[in-house]
Image (cartoon, helix red, strand yellow):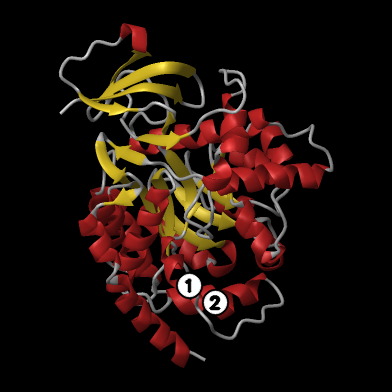
Amino acid sequence: MIKAITNTTLYDFHHFMEDAYIIFDEEILEIGLMKQFINRNYTIIDGKDHWVLPGLICGHTHLYSAFARGLMMPFHPHHFQEILDQLWWKLDRHLDLDMIYYSGLVFASDFLKHGVTTIIDHHASGKDIRGSLKMLSRAVSHDVGLRGIYAFETSDRFDVKACIQENVSFTSNSVSDFKRGLFGLHASSSLSEQTLKQVKKKLGDRPIHIHVAESEMDELDAKMRYSKPIIHRLADHGLLNPNSIIAHAIHIDDDELDLIQKHQSVIAVNISSNMNNGVGCPPIHRFIEKKIPVIIGNDGISSSITTEYLALYYMMHHQDQSPNPFQLSNLLKMIHDTYTYANSMLETKLGEFKQGYQADLLMIPYIPPTEASEENAFGHLFFGMFNAFQPKHVWIKGDIKIKNYQIKTSLENKIKQAQQASKRLWDILSKDV
């Protein structure tokens, strides 16, 4: 059934249109002003006093972190490696397929409630490696219905052969506009020379997804053990294929940035997580100067992406000690870069209201207290909506996923079963001392 949202305000981070309509099924069929609207027996959704936006994208996350919520265990880290040792590496090594499924289901559902319709996930699970990405995509892309790009964090902590095979299998067999694979690597500090050689043999032209210099310790480790910075190490192994995601990139130098740009890779920034872990913040002005695409992720710290837009903007002003060098236009460019990256990977059209683009849509109540126009629409979003962003309705490929702020009852019932899986994990962790 073809649907039409009428009497609404359309804004797609490019163009702004008041008193407008949008007609769609799986794709956008037509947009225009209400004075041009002709009802051809469409299902009508009244969008008066609402804005319609494209579905949002999270450029780097960890869905398995859902089961860390409320977790109480000894935690007194003095540096980043101890954060991994005391929390994340304890948690991820015990994840089995059942836990993977339910953590993905919970996190994807929460993302959906905050208007995120596409995610790029970096997964790790030591107990069950083989089949983990298929299980995760089943939860996220099939049962919840988000678009997803998935990768397994190859690491010497796990069975390297199984990690490599999981990445190869998923990237080879999961190809659609709803799910794709990247070749996942954890971080340089957990990857030996032998492992990188094994990865190269199987990588082909696949892009990688890897943490780089999230803490200074990672960069110093590469220089001490291999006598070169991380990006040089990856490049020397032939691993920087186009569309590779370099997550964090806080402690890298200009030569490394030149290599990232040369190999047509992108950087995923995750500001809230960086501040929470106390590892520093990325040199974003240098990324911009080098013309490296920057995509925005959240590193699994929350189920929102608009809060990352806020954190990024305010962090830059704090870091610059001035509101001038980093403008809303810079943030908007990164949002555009994130859509461009997802479109390239999924081979689809997201992020604009044009005929033939996917009908991944959000409808959110908003009555502007001041005049809104194409010039200031993003300012209305940033200061008027992003701090508490909760769409009333969400569609993905024209299928309604959130209706009147509620997910489907069948999905809600599945989510209620997640505590059984998380309890098993917590019981295991209580004995892992």
Where 239 sits versus 15, above or below?
below
Seen as rendered, the residue at the extreme top is 36
- Give the left or right position of residue 422, taking residue 58 as reference: left
> Please, what is the three-letter code of the amino acid marked with disc 2?
Leu
> Badge 2, how many Cα within 10 Å: few under 14, some, many 20+?
some
Name the spot of residue 288 as percent of width and height, x first: 68, 34
User: Which is nearer the N-term, disc 1 or disc 2?
Assistant: 1
Tags 1 and 2 touching, CB below 8 Å: yes
- Residue 67 visible, this angle: yes
Given residues 230 and 296, the one toward you in this image is 296
> Please, what is the three-letter code of the amino acid marked with disc 1?
Ala
Residue beneath disc 1: 68
Q: Quadrant of the N terminus?
A: top left
Residue beneath disc 2: 87
- Give the left or right position of residue 147, taking residue 245 as reference: left
Where 158 sits versus 106, above or below?
below
Front: mark 1 or 2? 1
Name the spot of residue 173 as percent of width and height, x first: 23, 50
Q: CA distance from mark 1 to mark 2?
A: 9 Å
